[in-house]
Structure formats: C-alpha cells, structure tokens
Amino acid sequence: MRPEDKDLVVQLCGARAGLHVDPQKDYLLESRLGPVARRENFGSIDEMIATLRSKREDRLAWAIVEAMASSETCFYRDRTPFALFRDEILPTLARLRDGEPIRIWSAACGSGQEVYSLAMTIDDQRALMPGTKLELFASDLSERALEKAQSGLYTQFEVQRGLPIRHLVRHFEKVDEMWVLSPRIRQMVRWRRINLVSDLSAAGRFDVIFCRNVLSALVEPMRVRLLENLARALSPDGFLFLGATETATGLSQAFQPVSGRPGLYARNPAFRAAA
Amino acid sequence: MKTCLVVDDSRVIRKVARRILEDLGFEIAEASDGLEALAWCRATMPDAVLLDWNMPVMTGIEFLRHLRLEPGGSKPTVLLCTVENDVERINEALDCGANEYIMKPFDSDIVASKFAEVGLA
C-alpha cells in the first residue's frame, strides 16, 4: 500500500471509531483490507482506496473501518471473568435486584463468542437463581460481525477454542461441517450495531458491561471518551469488565478497580455526582 | 514434571502432539495402540493421556474402558483426540470416562485450550 493510502485508512479509522491503526503494520492492513476489496469487487486494495478517495462513499468507508476493527476471539476468553461473573457478580446482583431484571451488555461482541459464553453461563445457573430475570444485550461496530454472531454458526476450529466439550454437546448441534448454537441460547440475546465512541445515551442502562480488548485498540483521547460513555451506561452499583491487559486507571476518574479482581471495575461514586 | 502418554497409531500425529505438549511442559511417553498404552499405564500411571480413537489391536475407547477399571486408573486426565466428530461419539467417549475431546485436525492453540480446560496448562 502507498504511504498516503495507509494514512487515509489511519485517519478514517481514528475519526469514525477512535481506532488506533499502526501504518507500519503492512501485513495487518493488507490482510484486513484485501477481503474487503475482493468483496466489493475491486481489483486491488489500491483501487479500492482510490475509489474511496474520489467518491467518499460512506458505505465503503465503514466497510474499511469495520474490517480494521475486527479481532479474533474465542469462547470463554481468559476464563477468569466468566468465573467471576458466575460466582460473584450474578449472585450479588440477583440479591440486590430482588426480581428486577439484571441487564448485561457485551459491548464489542465480535462474532458472538463472548455473549454466548455469558448466555451459556446464565443458562447453566438458572436453576440456582429462581425468580431472577436476566436480559442479555450484544453490540458491535461491525454489521458483518453481528450477522455472523446472530447466525450462531461456528467452525470446528472455533468451537474447540475455549469451549468445554460438555458445553458443546449440551448447547450445539452439528450441521454438516459446522456447529450451530441452540435457538434457546441464541434467543437470549438482543443485538444492535453500536459505535462505542459515539453518543451512547440511547443505549440504555446496564448492570454489567463486558467491554474487553476495545480500550487498548483506541487512540488515547477516545479511550477517555469510551470509559466515560460506559460509566454513563452503567448502573451506579454495576460492574465493568475490561480486557486482561487493559486498565482504566490513569485514564479517567469514571471507574475504580475492584480490589483483588484484575480487569473488574466499579463506577466511581464521584463520577456519578458529575454525570 | 507432569507426564502425558500420547496414544496414536500415526507416528506423525505422535510427533506433532509431542512437540506441542512438550511446549506446555509435559514429559511425553508414546504408545501406538490401546494395548501398548494399557501396559504403559499399568507400569506408570501418567497424569494425562492424549488418546486416538481408531487404532489397531485395541481402540482408544476399549483402552479407556479398561483404564478406568485399573487400580489408579481414575487418576489420568484423558483427552480423546480423533477424527470422530459426531455428538453421539463424543457422548460415548464422555460416558466412558473421557475428560475432554479434541476433534482432528487440531493445532497448538486448540491443544493448549483443551489442556487448560482440564487444569493441566
């Protein structure tokens, strides 16, 4: 790719999604943008960028941003957050809410493994929480990721990454060479396309937000905006999960870490006053 | 160091599995069928067994049934590793005492993920 084309992609991703794209990573740019160019019937990435530059077509611009924003994931990624959610967060909120719905949001759900891991966890716990209402929401920037997620269809490789075999046979059915998640689990989730660095005031209020591995993908000013957006979307006694290598500390006063629980944050009461 | 017995009639699969499992910190022993694996287990019970299904002499499932009846035979964590990928076959393996199940083809991420699932990586 030509340097000026890479610069255009960097600017586009930063402006639309707050996404940090390293122009030195040629392999990443080409591996993400090549499939977009082919899908959009361009002969090459260069040709696609030239069209973007001349026509400023909004749909194409978003296709490029969405491709750069996508990332690999797996079921029960990092394990600990799901155990924490099951063993501590859910019982605590079930007690506090006392029959009122607990609203859980997978904010960058990608191809769905995170939100479905939560759905399977909830399904397995139902008998232990009679009377507890749970509402599960999932969003992503990428329409394509949302489409794949909603299909509930996964390859054999995908279902073997992180998913215990007993969960596979309990919740999936094999259809030809693919594995399809049961409608019962799929129907637990409500889906929406959301750009996390835009205005989230219409997104609703949640008790638990999973927003893992997004913060580290953003340019610095957008990290602050993301955290403050999430703080406004989180109930005052709710919990935020960030990625295993991410921290809100030093970026924003909106959250405070939960002691002894890496990656888990609670809303800062001082921020509540300011919100 | 934890030990893993790799049971597969394919020398290539055993070699690939050995490399992945050594990277996960296991000491590896190999057997090319269920009977050989059973003899190994009677001498030294391993911590884990990575077990193919379809093998000559004694299949993986026959081995697993025998293993679980042996003194100390409940100790090893057994991961089936096979081309068999129907739900009925997976359930059969679980009913016979398998702890996890890897469908071939596999890669190092899948093996690491499955061994982590059973608390061995």
Image (cartoon, rainbow, N blue to C red):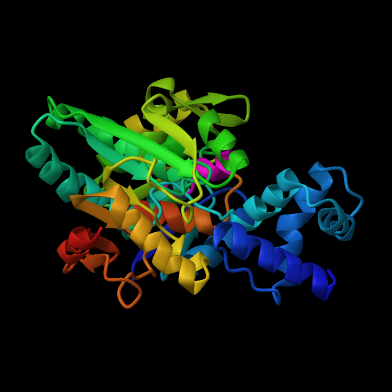
Q: Nearer the viewer, residue A128 or A233?
A: A233
In the displayed structure, does residue A217 sit left or right of residue B62? right
Dividing the picture into quadrants, the one containing residue A253 is bottom left
- Work out which quarter of the rendered image holds the N terminus of chain B and state it: bottom left
Can you give x and y, in whole percent of width and height, for residue A46 in the image?
Answer: 87, 61
Dividing the picture into quadrants, the one containing residue A266 is bottom left
Can you give x and y, in whole percent of width and height, for residue B38 in the image?
Answer: 39, 48
Dividing the picture into quadrants, the one containing residue A91 is top left
Q: Which residue is drawn at 42% across and 51% down?
A: B114
Q: Which of B28 and A19 is in front in this view?
A: A19
- Is residue A155 inside the magenta stretch? yes
Can you give x and y, in whole percent of width and height, for residue B70 in the image?
Answer: 26, 44
Read off the magenta span: A154-163
- Is residue B45 inside the magenta stretch? no
In the displayed structure, does residue A72 sit left or right of residue A129? right
Quick check: A266 above or below B9? below
Quick check: A141 above or below B44? above
Q: Can residue A237 be seen in this view?
A: yes
Q: Residue at x 24, y 62 (%)?
A: A265
